[in-house]
Image (cartoon, rainbow, N blue to C red):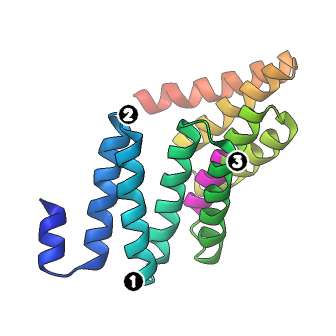
Amino acid sequence: TAINISEKINNKILLSDSLGNAGKVFSLRGDLENALEFYQRSLAIDKEAGYEEGKAIRLNDIGTIYKKQGELDEAIVFFNDSLKINESIKSRSEIAVNLSNIGGIYEEKGDLNKALEFYKKALEIDKELEYRRGIAIDLKNIASIYKAMEKTEEAEDYRQRAEKIYKILKK
């Protein structure tokens, strides 16, 4: 396996990425315990190697696992830690992902104003990057918040804008 090869050639970054990929497979299969274990092993290697990009990715992955487990307070800590690193290394696309994830936590907690604030920040960055898929996701998330706030006109506007982009992406 890639993990065995990485260990044999002593390539820390490859090992970290391989462990992270294994964690992703476990996560997709719904095996959150093993996913968390592999993400934590990957994070430990990233910390040891000083691999900032890897640390940010793994912190976000771990936050996602905690969110899936309903541990929202724990999840937001990891998303915020990932955000701080991404801001320090100026990874704009990952900052947008972090902002959207944090918005999702606030949405689940019922703090719709805070969720809207984070989703709009993510949208701003995705627009700057011209990342259509991210823009569509952000617009859909904002529409969801406006719908929950019973602001139907705004919700429909954002939903339609998201739908237009999704149609373009499907071509």
Contact? badges 3 and 2 (CB < 8 Å): no
Label 2: how many Cα within 10 Å (few below 14, some 14–19, many 20+): few
Identify the residue under disc 3. 73
Residue situated in front as seen by the camera: 38 or 121: 38
Q: Residues within 10 Å of mark 1 (few under 14, many from 20)?
A: some
Alpha carbons under labels 3 and 1: distance apart: 28 Å
Q: Which residue is mark 1?
A: 49
Residue 59 can be seen, yes or no: yes
Within the image, what quadrant is residue 93 found in? bottom right
Q: Is residue 72 above or below residue 148?
A: below
Q: Mark 3 or 1, which is nearer the eye?
A: 3
Instruction: Give the CA separation, mark 1 to mark 2.
Output: 29 Å
Callout 2, which amino acid? Gly
Is 72 displayed left or right of 91 in the figure?
right
Q: Quadrant of residue 157?
A: top right
Task: Residue under label 2, please give it.
Answer: 30
Coordinates of residue 63 in the picture (x, y in percent): 56, 51
